[in-house]
Image (cartoon, rainbow, N blue to C red):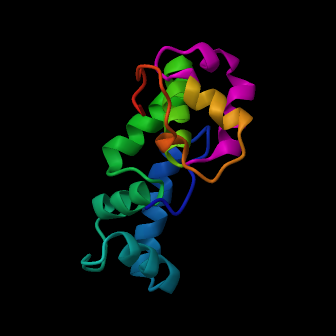
């Protein structure tokens, strides 16, 4: 479960430094750092390896592993339509209506994107409901990953 939100313009160098800082904090006995580790890796033995620190960081950002986190950052650095569609998928999955509104303000072409059905995008903009975006029913043939 993600405990932090990955900044839109993360850098690989910054993420590596964060993992190193976490590993050093664990070695220094920082209780918050140790709690972060045990929240993501309950059976981890201390001190942490760099690889384990990277895994903790990746999981805090909602990725299953370091490679997935790096892939996400590289996509975001591209900032193109693929990244915007990927971000929209994540936001829809998280039922973050305000986040989707902000993304659509930056990338209006998403409303006509073939990677996502417009029903999910428009529903987020026009309805105020607690029903998750990814479970709302519709009658037309499913065309997107969520349907």
**48 sits to left or right of 117:** left
Classified by dominant secondary structure, the portion drawn in magenta counts as helix
Between 136 and 120, the one lying in front of the other is 136
Could you tell me if residue 11 is visible in this image?
no
In the image, is residue 97 part of the stretch drawn in magenta? yes
Whether 35 is drawn above or below 40: the answer is below
Whether 57 is drawn above or below 113: the answer is below
Quadrant of res 35: bottom left
How far across and down, in percent of the image, does residue 112 sit? 60, 13
Between 90 and 136, the one lying in front of the other is 136
Whether 56 is drawn above or below 62: the answer is below
Tell me which residue sits at (57%, 50%) in the image: 131
How far across and down, in percent of the image, does residue 114 sit? 49, 14
**Quadrant, the C terminus:** top left
Tell me which residue sits at (49%, 55%) in the image: 17
Could you tell me if residue 123 is visible in this image?
yes
Between 86 and 26, the one lying in front of the other is 86
Tell me which residue sits at (33%, 51%) in the image: 64
How far across and down, in percent of the image, does residue 78 sit? 53, 23
How far across and down, in percent of the image, does residue 88 sit? 55, 33
Magenta residue span: 95-118
**Quadrant, the N terminus:** bottom left
Whether 21 is drawn above or below 110: the answer is below
Quadrant of res 4: bottom right
Tell me which residue sits at (62%, 47%) in the image: 96
Say how many tags the image has.
0
């Amino acid at each position: 479960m993600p405990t932090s939100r990955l900044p839109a313009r993360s850098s690989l160098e910054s993420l590596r430094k964060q993992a190193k800082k976490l590993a050093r904090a664990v070695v220094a006995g920082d209780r918050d750092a140790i709690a972060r580790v045990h929240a993501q890796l309950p059976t981890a033995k201390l001190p942490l390896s760099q690889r384990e620190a990277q895994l903790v960081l990746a999981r805090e950002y909602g990725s299953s592993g370091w490679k997935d986190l790096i892939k996400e950052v590289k996509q975001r650095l591209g900032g193109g339509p693929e990244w915007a569609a990927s971000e929209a998928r994540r936001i829809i999955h998280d039922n973050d209506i305000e986040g989707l509104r902000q993304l659509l303000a930056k990338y209006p072409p998403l409303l006509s994107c073939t990677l996502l059905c417009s029903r999910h995008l428009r529903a987020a903009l026009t309805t105020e409901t607690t029903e998750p975006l990814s479970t709302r029913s519709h009658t037309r043939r499913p065309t997107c990953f969520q349907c």
